[in-house]
Amino acid sequence: MPVTQANAELPAEFGRILNKALEKDRNLRYQTATDLKTDLIRLRRDTDPSRKTTAEATGPDTSTEDIITVLSKIKGLNIFSRATVLAYRDRPVTPAQISQQLRATCVLTGSLRRAGNRLRINAQLVDTRTDFPLWSERYDREMQDAFEVQDEIARKIAEALRLTLAPQGQVAPAAKPTENLPAHDL
């Protein structure tokens, strides 16, 4: 009988963690105590009722969605959908593995951490062929308005990627209008 069926008060995720820790096949069990600890800490974070509303407002899913929305507006830049991207969340995959599965040439990775009223986002654009970062940046902000912070960081990442990708010819520069007034009138 699965653990969560024996005690309905336990979150289903705890049952998954416990079943993985007790797995008979050693290749399917946790490989290190750190992996088990990480999953337990994440479970505690995700089930803590005092953090639920803030976590929902500033969580990685909404940040990911905001960044995808802003980046998808860059001409010549192909962005995978939110559903495709979130399938890789919290999975130990390398940019090279993502490249093999999705044929992506670059992967934007990052992390979001919160301490009190402070928010820190680290972002890296990684070349999937070399596994070297093409660009990386850290953003530290006070979190008075979570949505404003997410919008600002999404815009800054988009600006940085425009500059990083422009030399490779992936982003078209804006055309300068004519300075000849009669030509402009025509």
Image (cartoon, rainbow, N blue to C red):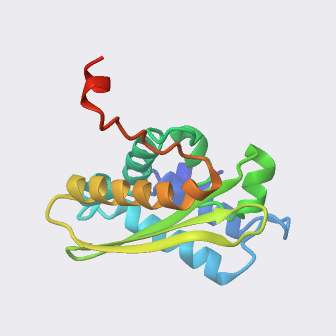
Q: In terms of image quadrants, where is residue 80?
A: top right
Q: Residue at x 48, y 54 (%)?
A: 162
Q: Residue at x 84, y 70 (%)?
A: 26
Q: Position of residue 123 (x, y in %)?
A: 48, 67
Quadrant in the picture for the C terminus? top left
Which residue is nearer to you in this view: 49 or 161?
Answer: 161
133 w.r.t. 108: above or below = below
Total tally of numbered discs in the picture: 0
Which residue is nearer to you in this view: 185 or 135?
Answer: 185
Q: In terms of image quadrants, where is residue 76?
A: top right
Q: Position of residue 98 (x, y in %)?
A: 73, 54
- Would residue 177 be seen by someone viewing this image from the given angle? yes
Q: Is residue 120 left or right of residue 161?
A: left
Q: Residue at x 65, y 82 (%)?
A: 33
Q: Position of residue 168 (x, y in %)?
A: 64, 55
Q: Residue at x 40, y 61 (%)?
A: 46
